[in-house]
Image (cartoon, helix red, strand yellow):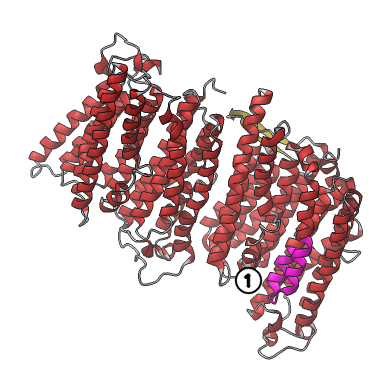
Amino acid sequence: MSLTALWLAPALGGAAALLAGRRARWVALLAALATLAYAISLAPAARSGAAAGGGGFALLGVRYLLGLDGLSLALCWLTAFLTAASLLGSWAGEFPPGFWAAFLFMESALLGLFLSRDLFLFFVFWESVLVPMFFIIGLWGGAGRRHAAMKFFLFTFCGGIFLLLGSIGAVTMYSRAAGELTWDLARLKGPPGAAGTLIFIGMALGFAVKIPIVPLHTWLPDAHTEAPAAGSVMLAGVLLKMGVYGFLRVLWPLFPELTWSLMPWLGGLAAVNVVYGAFCAMAQRDLKRLVAYSSVAHLGFCMLGVLSRTPEGLLGGGLQLLNHGLTTGALFLLLGFLYERGHRRGLSDYGELYARAPWLTFFFGFAFMASIGLPGLNGFVGEFMSLLGMARALPILAVAGVAGVTLSAAYVLPAYQEVFWDAPGPGSVSPSVTDLGGRERALLWLLCGLMLAIGLYPGPWLRLLQPALLGLVP
Amino acid sequence: MTGLSGGGMLPPLRLLWPQCALAAGVLFVLAAGAVRRAAPGAGLKAASLAFVAAALALLAPTPEAASAPLLGLDALGRSLQGVFFAAALPLLYVMEPADEVPPALVLAALVGMGLIAVSANLLTLFLGLETMSLPAYLLVSRSRSATGLEAAVKYFFAGSTASAFFLMGMALHYAAAGSLALGAAPGGLGGAGLALMGAAALFKLGAVPLHFWLPDVYEASDPELAGFFSTALKAAAVLLLARLASIAPAGAFAAALPWAASLTILFGAVAALRQTNLARLLAYSSISHVGFMMLAVAAWARGGRVRTAEGALFFYLAVYVFMSGGAFLWLRTAGISSRRQLRGLARARPAQAAALAALLLALAGIPPTAGFAAKFLVFWEALKAGLYAPMILGGLGAVVALGYYLGLIRDMYFDPPDRHTAPAQARPARGWGVVAAFAGAAVLLGLTPWLVNMPWRAGAP
């Protein structure tokens, strides 16, 4: 019951916000903070492994099964934290109640996703995330929002259909083989042989769209760029994690051997992600698009670590999920603040911002450094461990990953220099940019503090993830 | 299925109680019309009364084995009668009270559908089919639009051709099997007969390539009637198809059915993408949905006619009443016919836009709506029956269909209003309560299969 409350609370908060009229943002913030507090209070339950809920009725073997381990808890924390942060980040905007409610509905679906231990339940939450995000992009996004919202929904739904058909196939074949009809992820095993490979590919397609794996990534730059700042935070910070999480929670336990035998292919795709994402980012003249492409590269790191199937790689990949959420979340928040002031996103629209907005410059610099993996900050720990793991499993892919680290500096630093330090060009909107206010600074101190804390002392976070992830190591 | 062929001793009339009530209702409604100056609206009242009586008669307990040479009632037939009633119910709310003919025609069509539901014999099946179709032609001809009469003629000729096919098929079947009872499975000539009768059923369903009459008819009819055609008449035609498929589950007709189904799903989805008239768009969308129903029938016939497959079929048809019936009713109550009028509607009429968005999401099959649960159950049964390729094609069709369902939501919510946009309504039209209830049902029924252990599922794997 206690876990049901975790995903139900934001949904109820969202409904309340819809009815609250002009107080909607307060109601929403209250609900988001209460959810965050409740999620944090679940830590002992997750550690003891006692937290599990549901059961009861079963129809076609579907059961309402919830569970909580370190991986779920970490991602629940990330979701609850970033939801509250993105609400605070949009605090100054004049948004209708639907805006605030949409974020809470999305949070509810995301928490449900990270908690479910039944494949069917997982799928229902997986698709439920789409609807609020579709409206967030389409209603409150930038100039190309109509197109971006459609593209986002269609891509993910298309992947979702393959995921659904694959799941049905896996469950029916398991019930035929084992004589037990169940969607329970702890018991389900994928079928062997050609049918198994086909089902694996179908389900992997569903997850790959979300991660996103090149060449299924084309929805991402549009969606991230056109979404409102808070929407981009949630998209990059949490929604991309769904794909890797699904891979770890569903695909891997179902097909342990197949995942391993296909590892060179999947890992190759992840390495392509790292390098291709970096080159694309390098070519961007739009700051938000640049950060969007950097996400493609970073998620490639996560996959490289996870696929190595070594303890350090898995832990590094898992930690990198959190790191990317924090870092890119902070970057998209900052981009939102910058856009609120200058109403432009182009690199050449700004210049010499350090003089007008020192705090903005500082926080941008901090988040950029974390993003390229500066030692002492969180990104370094995750990327280093991921690459270490991959170096033990398949060194050639680790080499590609290391090249990606170098490339990330090559796209981040020139952009940072052009926007904040170089002399502004003609038509620059720099003069209109004012520095961050108290609310904005407080929010970013919190995010940057966490980045530093993870970077300096990752131990507790790794211990949190350890039991869940090391179970996957053969 | 034994319930259909066994020769019980119960008086068969008992199975026909709902139809008797409806037929009496037709007479009363028409009689009320004779005194309509004295009591306006008496026709609708009489129709409602007949309706309630028929529904009660349906609920009255009938032993499962109650059957006769011509009549029989199984779980599928009984539950689908409930679907017919649910589909016809909203009409009583939105019809003009002054005109007594449409309610009488709807009741007469319901009599025919009920006959299809209780028939255990090709002859009664045909009688039901004709009793259902003739009022439908008349209803189309009386619609308000300028092209109503033209569409009615087209519908009539198409429908009559289908009836001729059915009769011809019946004759061939009789020649081969020596009986018109359902259940005999003759080969050779009988297979050809079955194919002809199947073609008639596909015709009535609007399955590709026998769908050409359908968009014209739906576009020309009043939207609420189009909704009735798209739900109740389809459910009856699906039942007809199921009865035919059960004659020879291993025959060529049953083998071709899943492929026809996936073709129908894909064609309907693709053709709807470019429609600018909303009734036409929904007509193509209904073609696509019919494909899913056909897939369910195919899985049912092929998988040994298990009750879970019947449950999936029933659930799809029941949910479809709320989704499609609700969407057509929405068109009627909102007074909107063209896609252009939807642009920016969310600002002028937020509640109406939300209702349509909910219906569209259900039609698209997005979890956790009922439309998703319905599609999921069909996919499940199709896979259990080993229909892999049609299932995957159906999945692709669902993706394509998302393009226009989502496109309509985009138009309503993301576009600014322009000069085509429908203005805000000063006074809500009649029937909004029904639309809201249907939209709510289309979303919330998605939870029911998982919360309520349907009788279908008792003891089933």
Q: Residue at x 8, y 39 (%)?
A: B34
- Residue A301, quarter of the rendered image: bottom right
Q: Is residue B354 above or below residue A1?
A: below
Q: The disc numbered 1 marks a residue on which chain? A: A
Does residue B435 appear anywhere in the picture?
A: yes
- A229 or A158: which is nearer to us? A158
Q: Residues within 10 Å of mark 1 (few under 14, many from 20)?
A: few
- Give yes or no for residue A283 being in the magenta stretch: yes
Q: Position of residue A220 (x, y in %)?
A: 65, 62
Q: Which residue is mark 1?
A: A92
**Main secondary structure along the magenta-highlighted residues:** helix
Mark 1 is on which residue type?
Answer: Ala
Q: Which portion, as a residue range, is magenta?
A: A274-295
**In this view, which residue lies farthest toward the top?**
B9
- B252 relative to A290 in the view: left or right: left
> Is residue A24 visible in the rendered structure shown here?
no
Residue at horizontal 72%, vertical 59%?
A237
SS class, disc 1: loop
Q: Residue furthest front?
A: B188
Specify whether residue A70 is painted magenta. Answer: no
Q: Quadrant of the C terminus of chain A?
A: top right
